[in-house]
Image (cartoon, coloured by chain):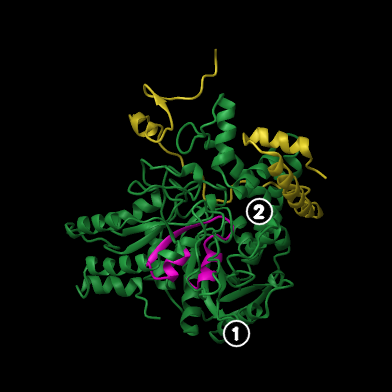
Amino acid sequence: MKIDKNTINKIARLSRIKLDDKESEDYINDLNSILDWVEQLNEVNTANVEPLSNISSSILPKREDVSKDANSSEEILENAPDKLEGFFAVPKVVE
Amino acid sequence: MSKLSLKQTLKDLDTKKISIRELNQDYLKRIKEKENLNVFIHFSEENVLKQIDKLEKDDSPKKLKGIPIAIKDLFCTKSMPTTAASKILKNFNPTYESFVTQKLLDEGSIFVGKTNLDEFAMGSATNTSFFGNTINPLSKEDEPLAPGGSSGGSAAAVAADLCLGATGTDTGGSIRQPASFCGVVGIKPTYGLCSRWGIAAFASSLDQAGIFSHNVEDASILLQSIAGFDQRDSTSAKVDIPNYFENLDDDLNGKTVGIPKEYSIDGIPMEISQIWEDAIKILEKKGVKIKNISLPHTKYALPTYYIIAPAEASSNLARYDGVKYGFRSDEIDSLDEMYENTRAQGFGREVKRRILIGTYVLSAGYYDAYYLKAQKVRKLISDDFNKAFKECDFIVTPTAPSAAFPLNEKQNDPIKMYLNDVFTVPASLAGLPGISIPFGEDKNNLPLGIQILGKHFDEQQVFNVATSLERSYE
């Protein structure tokens, strides 16, 4: 078993998702069965194979390096759950 | 079928046989009649009427003037909320317009509403949406069927004739599979053909926008309208967009079709093998050479996809933290608590599952074994296609391993659910264009689909084959 209670807690923490005990149990099972299934990739010999990260066959186009002032802070804040004087507001982090 | 085609409607509008208002009133009426299908997450009659008013005052010629189009609720739209079918974006009102929807607006189309999908496009049945299931319009009364997914709402909107076309996105099959389930045409173009700007990201190296329509001609018209270069998407391709519709040519004489032997898999219903053979026979009669090809790494495409897609998703979905937009939990004693509770309460089960698996395969100590390994196998899958396309002009396969399944079919086993994408995922990993067209029926009279795959940016060939098969089937 690759994923145990400790591992799921660690991943959940890294993902910033709180899980209750029942959920943890479910995800331990799900993730283990998915990981067992993807294990079949080990059958494939990938020695000397370059990883493919960008499938786009076109060359990354360059653009002119000019700055623009969109002056859009109001728009950016429009959907914020909490804002204060032109900033996003979050719970206090320093005492 | 009595459904109007886009091509015919454009003519009728042009010759004033019908007005923009009359046309759209007709669609509005049907949308209200079919509310039970739960096709739309957002629909507002008032908003549609406003768009009609505006267009009536506009004298400039526009290619899609007055055409009712449905938009998958993954595209940011200024005039309507955008939720990605997630609680975490329940109240999100974009302040900008996606590239694809802006193009459609510039052409004068009317947005009838935002269609339902699997939450963040993660699913194959439109059953992971925070806003409930969409029902396949082809369902019999006693047994509701799934429309496929993730773009199930858009596929259903076209199938129920609630619009003349719809946008979708396809990451591993999310346009082609629902098109097959709902008996409509669905095209996923080459990766990079349509800008991803303004589409809520799922797996950025795979996500691609596309089109649903009643027939291939209509799809060729609409795809041209949403394609094009955009500097705000770094993977957007600088290629010329042909007039696919004008160039449609159903003469396939002398072309070569590749038939991959690895797509004959165990447990596929007989009817699906049958329609595949029927399609090949029709092509042969049209003078197409049949070439048996091999794509040897096909069986590894699904496990490769289910490492790469969740990995990218876990990174993309990190932005939903309750700070900048969307839902924020009430339980916020500290900043960390706020993040953890917001994401726990805001995301559904399948999305959390994929974030967790993605985080795991990217985490220290596992990156090489899973993510890097998957990227290497992806290279081999892509090489398989490149080799095959030296011997053939296009590839024909079934679209999905089944017809539409019952909505209530228990999907407890994630791997079983993932198998829905078995025929569509390989081309996604290779970034190739693919179309699904309705082709035959199963024993319960449910539609089945045939998939045509082409070379990178050879959408024209894909459309040509599709239109040729469509015409000989009718």
Does dot 1 land on a helix, a strand or a loop? helix
Within 10 Å of disc 1 (Cα), the crowding (few <14, some 14-19, many 20+) is: few
Pick the quarter of the image with the N terminus of chain B: bottom left
Q: Which residue is mark 2?
A: B305
Q: Chain of mark 2?
A: B
Instruction: Give the image location of residue B461, x and y in percent.
Output: 50, 70
Please tell me which residue lies in front, B241 or A14. Answer: A14
- Residue in the image at 67% along x and 33% along y: A13
- B216 sits left or right of B178 in the view: left
Tell me the residue at 64%/47% (across/down).
B354
Say if mark 1 contacts mark 2, CB within 8 Å: no
Q: Report the span colored magenta.
A: B155-184
Q: Position of residue B147 (x, y in %)?
A: 53, 66
Q: Is residue B213 left or right of residue B451?
A: left
Q: Residue at x 37, y 53 (%)?
A: B101
Question: Residue B224: which quarter of the image?
Answer: bottom left
Residue B244 visible in image: no
Q: What letter labels the chain drawn in green?
A: B
Amino acid type, mark 1: Lys
Can you identify the residue that label 1 sits on? B281
For this view, does B349 lie left or right of residue B12?
Answer: right
Along the viewing direction, whichever of B42 and B220 lies nearer the viewer:
B42
> Do discs 1 and 2 belong to a common subunit?
yes
Considering depth in this image, is B64 or B326 the residue closer to the camera?
A: B326
Question: Splitting the image into 4 quarters, where does residue A11 fall?
Answer: top right
Q: Which chain is yellow?
A: A
